Image (tube, rainbow, N blue to C red):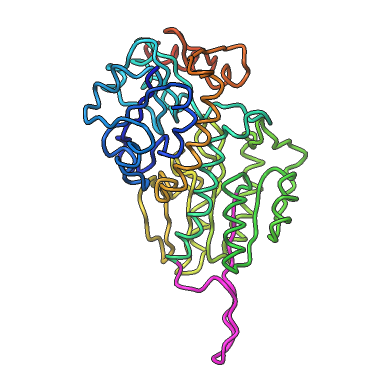
Amino acid sequence: MLLGILKESAPGETRVALLPESLKSLLAQGIAIIVEAGAGLSAGASDQAYVEAGATIAADRNSILATADLLPLVNAPTAADQARLKPGAVVIGFLKPLDAPAELAAAIARPVTLFSMELVPRISRAQSMDALSSMATVAGYKAVISAADRLPRLFPMLMTAAGTVPPARVFVIGAGVAGLQAIATGRRLGAVVEAYDVRAAAGEQVRSLGAKFLDVDLGGISAEGGGGYAAELSEEALDRGRDLITRTAAHSDVIVTTAQVPGRPAPRLIRRAAVEVMRPGSVLVDLAAPAGGNCELTKPGITQQIGGVTLLAPLNLAAEIPVHASQLYARNILNFLALIVKKGVLGVDLADEILAGACVAHEGQPVNPRVAKLLEAAKTPAK
């Protein structure tokens, strides 16, 4: 069996699916590994390091695509790459099957087996494969560091001979993995941190990190969704949260917003009015920018200055810390591979709930029912 590691082709992508130190257990099973030249350079892994680990380096990307039985990736392959995949190969990565299922049509028809790391079920047995949480951890940390770099104020309280400098005030919206990491990072830097989440159950985690949890009465509406995510809320319930956010924004130096619902546009929680009441020099980091943004003024991928407020809308913060992001992702991939590669033999058992949940397509047919429905809708001409 041949496993291929490609250099990621998406603009700005610096991560790699597997690092040299990830290969030992795979090579011990008799798996041959071929790496595209330069695949790990941005993540601190040289071609020589891969060779020393036991892999082979190849400059011909197309030959890897055509011969690899197993292809772990960070991002979905392009249509051109999909057309060159070996029929029957297994591809694993962040494939965005709920956001852009039609872009996987060429691979499905090839046919290849597609596993999407976004779809790994959030169950205890799959925690070590939860790449979304791994990347959210990196993004939550980097969001606060980016804000601190832009903020024209200090984060910690300082008592000096020239007087006392008050601490910065950080407001985190969404207390999922990224939000909790943002809270923890803000606290480590010495800021006073407040947080809001529509899920009242998140309050205990927020308070355990030393932050203040802001609760909103949603009128008895349940905000708990599946897999630890928040559910989609009605406009009435969202408005109650928006009012709180606007009031809190007025005294916040930094806002980090992380609220997302899988497969849906990000909820618009921050009105223009909330940005307008922020003090000049304040910073807003919208981590939901890839899904459209939590702020109604967000332009994904574009940094804006709005009335003296810096609005950051990064599309791939994890790629800004490629060494540790790649290390975490590689561990997730290795744990997932253990389900489909046993003693060097590749086998896909869709009776396993993790594999069934993460599988987008197998043997030329969509497996995930949501993806199948979206693909069918894409084929249906608009009336």
State how many labels appear.
0
Q: Position of residue 199 (x, y in %)?
A: 70, 43
Which residue is located at x 63 percent, y 18 percent?
A: 353
Which residue is located at x 60 percent, y 55 percent?
A: 245
Residue toward you, 147 or 113: 113
Residue toward you, 378 or 272: 378
Q: Position of residue 116 (x, y in %)?
A: 48, 25
Q: Is residue 129 left or right of residue 207?
A: left
Residue toward you, 381 or 121: 121
Q: Quadrant of residue 186?
A: bottom right
Q: Is residue 54 above or below residue 353?
A: below
Q: Is residue 262 above or below residue 364?
A: below
Q: Position of residue 166 (x, y in %)?
A: 59, 77
Q: Is residue 160 left or right of residue 225?
A: left
Please report the bounds of the magenta region as a residue range.
151-173
Residue toward you, 157 or 354: 354
Report the quarter where the C terminus lies.
Answer: top left
Which residue is located at x 57 percent, y 65 percent?
A: 252
In this view, the residue farthest toward the right is: 220
Q: Quadrant of residue 208?
A: bottom right
- Residue 159 inside the magenta-drawn segment: yes
Report the quarter where the N terminus lies.
Answer: top left
Q: Quadrant of residue 58?
A: top left
- Residue 225 inside the magenta-drawn segment: no
